[in-house]
Image (cartoon, rainbow, N blue to C red):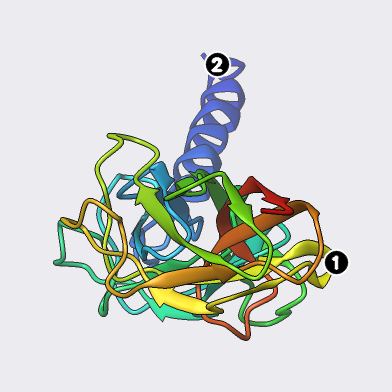
Amino acid sequence: MKKIIPYLTIILSTVFLVFTSCDRRGTSSTNISSEYYLEVFAFDSVSVPDQLVQIGCFVTDYTGEQLGGVQVNFEVIGDFGAISPNRESSADDTVDGLITDLYFQPQGGYGAVEIVASIPDEANPSVTEASDTTAIEVYPYNLELWAESNSIPKESDTHIYCRALNPFNNIQTGNIDLAFGVENDFGSITPTAKSDADSQTGLQSNVIYTAPNSTGVATIVAAAKYNYASPYNMGSDTLQITVTSN
């Protein structure tokens, strides 16, 4: 019996040490994980160059609970467009997950872009805690350019018509700035006009090409513009008019 007591003492001591080492009393379990999870998305995955695309982003914790008050940084990866650099997440907004609305602005460019959302580490902003991306494809408008007459005598003129068509449904679109020109300055043309959604000419005002005092072929160029100072065309088309001697 005397030999058993030391063994019992060792066993009880071991159990006590194991128990006390696993005891979490007095510590917080609310910060088991500090990881963030991001879900960024575009309300429209396709768009046109003069249309804003709303962006949403949900921030959650490891349990899936939506978190508010977290700064999220946003960046456009591509050759065009702009987005606000940051927004604060919302714990209650179930539409876009953000305190205030956020939009991607193509600014007249078209092609593929990616929107990147990221959460920087508070202690070291150069380190990213979480990130996610969403893709948007921006398509140009389709322009239909034609003339009242494709063959005119020199020093005469003809009306030029142009429709701006939505690339997704082919519907005629109004209030788009259109710029017109003639290659090699072979004649002259009304430089600008706005598109019209209902007119058979596609334009809100007359555009006239005037032939020079020589014969040849004039190449008319039309471009849809985000604004006239923008380097981007939102769509373009060309037309040839033959200038004759009589």
Q: Nearer the viewer, residue 202 or 17?
A: 202
State which mark lies toward you, 1 or 2.
Answer: 1
Would you identify the image quadrant in which residue 229 lies? bottom right
Q: Residue 234's image quarter?
A: bottom right
Q: Residue at x 66, y 64 (%)?
A: 80
What residue would you read off at disc 1? 184
Query: Height in image: 106 above or below 10?
Result: below
Q: Earlier in the sequence, mark 1 or mark 2?
A: 2
Residue drawn at x 53%, y 66% is 157
Give the residue at the far bottom of this rendering: 229
Residue 116 in sight: no
Mark 2 closeness class: few <14, some 14–19, many ≥20 residues within 10 Å:
few
Please state which amino acid type lies under the numbered disc 1: Asn
Q: Dot 1: few (<14), some (14–19), or many (≥20) neighbours within 10 Å?
A: few
Query: How far is the residue under mark 1 from the one under mark 2?
Result: 110 Å
Coordinates of residue 33 in the picture (x, y in percent): 47, 54
**Total marks in image:** 2
Q: Please indicate whether residue 207 sits to the left or right of residue 196 in the image.
A: right
Relative to the observer, which residue lies in front, 26 or 197?
197
Q: Secondary structure at mark 2?
A: helix
Q: Secondary structure at mark 1?
A: helix
Given residues 65 and 204, the one toward you in this image is: 204
| Residue in the picture at 66% in, 67% down | 211
Of the numbered discs in the image, which one, if any, rests on residue 173?
none
Q: Amino acid at mark 2?
A: Ile
Residue 61, position in %: x, y? 37, 54
Determine which residue is flagged by label 2.
4
Q: Residue at x 40, y 39 (%)?
A: 167
